[in-house]
Each structure stands twice: as C-alpha cells, then as structure tokens.
Image: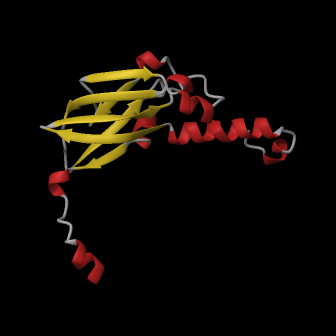
Amino acid sequence: MTNPARWRDLSDRELEALYLTVCAENFQWRADHCALDGGRLSMNGWALTLSGAPGDARFLLNGTPFEKIDFPLPSPDLAQIFWNIPTAPFARFACRTRADFQDGYARLEFRDGRGPVHSLRRAWYLPNPKDDLPVPEASRIRRV
C-alpha cells in the first residue's frame, strides 16, 4: 500500500488496520521489565510473531537463546490494541538466562521467522548496571 492516492478509497477501519500493521512490523516487541539477580537476567514483556509459528520464535541475549522462555502467554490487552494481528492474543513472554554484558551492554533480540537481520534492527540494548555513573544526592540535583 505505497500509493497514498489509494488510501482515500479505504474505510477508517481499513486505515486503522494498515496503521497497526505498520506499527507491529516496525516495533514488534518490547521488554516491559528487566531485572538482574545474582548474575541472572529476567525479562518479561510482549512480542508479536509476524512470520512463522509463535512456538518457533526465539529470544536471544547477544545472539544466544535464553535458557528459560515462557512464550506465548495470554495477552488480552494486546489483543484489543492489535485487533488485526492474529498472534496478538498470545504475545506475552517471560524469559530468564545468565547475564552476559559484552562491551558494556547486553543485546536483547526477538526472532520470529523473518531472520537475523530483521531481529537485529529491532534489538534492545541493556547497559551493564556495573558501568552506571553514580547518581548525585537529591540536594545536589536540586542545586544544579
């Protein structure tokens, strides 16, 4: 649908579906929460499988699969938002693996059937908390 003149012929519902599809293709997944505990990284969020079966999708940390993955999980909230994406009703996930921060960060990827280039373009980067700069006290923050 690259011809904007054709958009005039679409209903509001069809335009909304087109918009949601573009959003899903370009954003596709999000980690709602990441936590480190004793060298283990836990992550949960949502991921829309747009190619391939949801059971074949993978979550990767620096290119290595997470050790424990619970996906797909029910996601009624996403089913309402992305009503036109068939996998949205089961798009929640929870993952856990050994934390590995290469070059000061961990690269988090969701890979469905679209392959590595697609997932790398949608990767999230988690900085190593040990490399964080110290945060000044509240009184110094207010002063500045």
Task: Give the residue drawn at x 83%, y 38%.
Answer: 10
Residue lying at the far left of the rendered structure: 38
Task: Give the residue drawn at x 40%, y 32%.
Answer: 110
- Foreground of the two, 30 or 58: 30
Task: Give the residue drawn at x 16%, y 56%.
Answer: 131
- Answer left or right for 80 relative to 111: right
Can the viewer see residue 107 in this picture? yes
Query: Image quarter for residue 56?
Result: top left
Q: Percent position (x, y) of residue 109?
A: 36, 36
Q: Quadrant of the N terminus?
A: top right
The image shows residue 67, relative to residue 30, as above or below, that is: above
- Foreground of the two, 51 or 32: 32
Residue lying at the far bottom of the rendered structure: 143
Q: Percent position (x, y) of residue 102?
A: 19, 45
Residue lying at the far front of the rendered structure: 139
Task: Give the residue drawn at x 20%, y 71%.
Answer: 136
Q: Quadrant of the C terminus?
A: bottom left
Can the viewer see residue 144 in this picture? no
Q: Percent position (x, y) of residue 92?
A: 44, 28
Query: Image quarter for residue 12?
Result: top right
- Answer left or right for 61 relative to 18: left
Query: Image quarter for residue 69?
Result: top left
- Foreground of the two, 60 or 16: 16
The image shows residue 65, relative to residue 137, as above or below, that is: above
User: How many numbered circles are shown?
Assistant: 0
Q: Percent position (x, y) of residue 107?
A: 30, 42
Give the colour scheme shown: secondary structure
